[in-house]
Amino acid sequence: MPSISITEGYTFTNWGPLTTTFTAPASCATATGNYQIGLNTTAPFFDYAIQCSTAGFGDCIPSGTVSDFTTSNENPKTIYDQAYLSPGLYCPSGWATKGIAVRDADKSLSTSGVLSSATRVSMPSFIPQWQNPVTLFLDLLDPSETLVMCCPDSMTADLAVGCYSTVSDYKITEGCMREFPATDLGISTEIIISEESTSTQLINIVTGTQPITVATRTFSPSETSRLVAVSVWPMLSLVHHQSDVPSATSSQTASPSSSATRVAPNGNIWGGLGIFLAMYLVVFSSSVLFQ
């Protein structure tokens, strides 16, 4: 695929290769800046964050996949900017494959893991929905290209959340919410054509550039008893072409758990834990936990 691709308003940009195994600083294992807050009955879905002064993950993920930025300088349209690493052959140390998609030479698509559910969500036509960039990205794969989604070993992958795990022992006292100004949001109508029928779906779109606002809240003891902290990380996006694998693997000796190893006999399913992809759009919630 081209180094920059645009589809349905999203821009997918190749931020460069990742052909060695990235190892994050030890401090990343105990970082709390990525903690979110949600009801303990609906986790991992969340409405508040532990902190809203910064977003991004610094040197805890391979350079370039997600940039740090300050809330006061945010432009809501940046949610349309999606990055991936290519050729990307190795998951960071301590991360694991969560989903794979392979575009075969005949242009058919094979998926597994979390990517098996990367389809357009079927919603009533009168309810606006957010586009999932992972779904759009699959359409951009060229023949013989592979996407692999990875998350930290201990985390669960979810296309609507990212990589997550609950942190039941974190003491919650306050939180913050990042909201789109209502004037920045609009609705578009998309025509969906399938083999069986043609239908329409309302799509949420960002139309303005007013900065995202931040609201804070101190929770009462009765509220905190219903809440849980959720550690959330972005799924990392790696893409490679089949021709990238021999030259990359010959330059690095890797263990079976981290190498861009082999193709199964049918040519559709990749083995090993080394070829990784992920991308995830964080849609800032404007809902409220307690009505």
Image: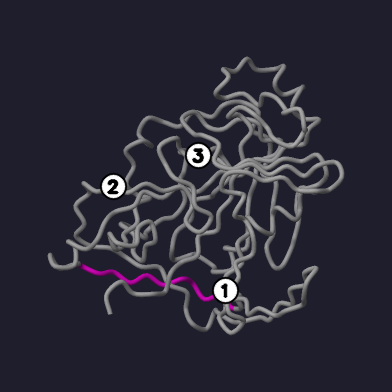
Q: Which residues are magenta?
A: 208-218
Task: Look at mark 3 in the image and give the residue it sits on.
Answer: 61
Identify residue type, mark 1. Gln
Task: Look at mark 1 in the image and give the residue it sits on.
Answer: 129
Identify residue type, mark 2. Val
Please tell me whether residue 64 is drawn above or below residue 224 in the rendered image: above
Q: Is residue 43 visible?
A: yes
The image shows residue 191 at horizontal and vertical percentages of: 74, 77
Pick the front one: 47 or 109: 109
Circle number at residue 73: none
Identify residue type, mark 3. Ile
Kind of element beneath mark 2: strand
Kind of element beneath mark 1: loop
Pick the front one: 85 or 105: 105
Residue 68 falls left or right of residue 186: left
- Observer-side mark, 1 or 3, equals 1
The image shows residue 185 at horizontal and vertical percentages of: 55, 79
The image shows residue 46 at horizontal and vertical percentages of: 37, 62
Circle number at residue 167: 2
Could you tell me if the residues under marks 2 and 3 are in contact, i.e. CB atoms within 8 Å? Answer: no
Kind of element beneath mark 3: loop
